[in-house]
Image (cartoon, rainbow, N blue to C red):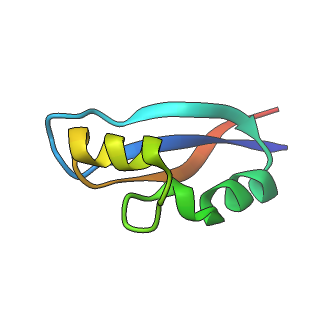
Amino acid sequence: MMRYKIIRMYQDELHSSRVIHRGLSLADAQEYCRDPETSSSTATSGHAKQRTKRCGPWFDGYDVDYKS
């Protein structure tokens, strides 16, 4: 079974992409990424707005993590 990871990616080259969740099913990874709080362009929480102010545009995406 394939497992997936969530990666936070930044437009600004000064901030490296980083894995924030691992071992998710495809359905869970897709559901996570559908949340408006997973992109600087749609997030409304104070925490997300602060991240955007500090780091510039960002979004969370998913990719294959491993096969189990």
Q: Position of residue 51 (x, y in %)?
A: 34, 41
Residue at 69% x, 61% y: name it: 30
Between 37 and 64, the one nearer to me in the picture: 37
Q: Position of residue 64 (x, y in %)?
A: 62, 45
Would residue 7 appear left or right of 54 to someone viewing this image? right
Between 12 and 52, the one nearer to me in the picture: 52
Q: Quadrant of the N terminus?
A: top right
Would residue 51 appear left or right of 63 to someone viewing this image? left
Would residue 4 appear left or right of 9 to someone viewing this image? right
Residue at 64% x, 66% y: name it: 34
Q: Which quarter of the picture shows residue 65? A: top right
Q: Which quarter of the picture shows residue 5? A: top right
Residue at 61% x, 59% y: name it: 33
Residue at 23% x, 34% y: name it: 15
Q: Quadrant of the C terminus?
A: top right
Q: Position of residue 45 (x, y in %)?
A: 50, 52
Using the image, determine if residue 38 lies above or below residue 50. below
Tally the numbered discs.
Answer: 0
Q: Which quarter of the picture shows residue 20? A: top right
Using the image, determine if residue 16 lies above or below residue 48. above
Would residue 28 appear left or right of 5 to someone viewing this image? right
